[in-house]
């Protein structure tokens, strides 16, 4: 299963910084490191001859031993550590989105349900 996570910010450089921070946070989490392969990327279409794209998407390839609650806890902990609790947009492989806008703990249940539904 694959999901993409983006940060909803007006300024692209700030969004890139937040995506990189979440990427590093997930790499530091043992459960995520074991069952998810995070990769940084860009959601923009590449323009031939242009400089590299800003990083604005974190893609996660989730393994079979993946536990939705583990990923949700890691993301909630990261959001609590950030000033202003960043809004995240989690896009599932089927195109559905879970938008995390409120307090990190309030959104955790919706994210877990969305991830588990996709696995089913």
Image (cartoon, grey):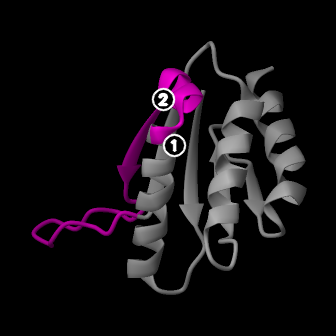
Camera-side residue of 48 and 15: 15
Give residue 69's quadrant in the image.
top right
Instruction: Rate crowding at label 2 as few (under 14), some (14 to 19) or many (20 or more) other CA atoms within 10 Å.
Output: few
Residue 52 is inside the magenta segment: yes
Marks 2 and 1 sit apart, C-alpha to C-alpha, by 7 Å
Q: Which segment did they paint magenta?
A: 28-55
Residue visible at 63% across and 77% down in the picture: 83
Residue visible at 55% across and 61% down in the picture: 6
Residue visible at 70% across and 32% down in the picture: 70
| Extreme-top residue of the structure | 64
Q: Are marks 2 and 1 in contact (CB under 8 Å)?
A: yes
Judged from the image, the secondary structure of the residue bearing numbered disc 2 is helix
Q: Quadrant of the N terminus?
A: top right
Q: Which residue is mark 1?
A: 26
Q: Is residue 72 left or right of residue 59?
A: right
Q: Is residue 17 above or below residue 112?
A: below
Camera-side residue of 85 and 120: 85
| Extreme-left residue of the structure | 49
Residue 19 position in % (x across, y down): 47, 61
Q: Is residue 22 above or below residue 15?
A: above
Residue visible at 15% across and 65% down in the picture: 48
Give residue 7's quadrant in the image.
bottom right
Judged from the image, the secondary structure of the residue bearing numbered disc 1 is helix
């Amino acid at each position: 299963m694959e999901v993409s996570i983006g940060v909803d910010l007006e300024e692209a450089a700030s969004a890139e910084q937040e995506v990189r921070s979440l990427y590093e946070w997930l790499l530091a989490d043992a459960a995520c490191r074991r069952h998810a392969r995070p990769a940084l990327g860009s959601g923009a279409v590449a323009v031939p001859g242009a400089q590299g794209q800003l990083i604005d998407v974190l893609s996660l390839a989730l393994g079979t031993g993946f536990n939705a609650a583990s990923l949700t806890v890691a993301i909630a902990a990261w959001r609590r550590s950030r000033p202003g609790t960043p809004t995240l947009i989690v896009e599932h492989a089927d195109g559905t989105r879970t938008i995390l806008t409120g307090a990190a703990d309030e959104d955790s249940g919706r994210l877990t349900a969305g991830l588990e539904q996709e696995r089913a």
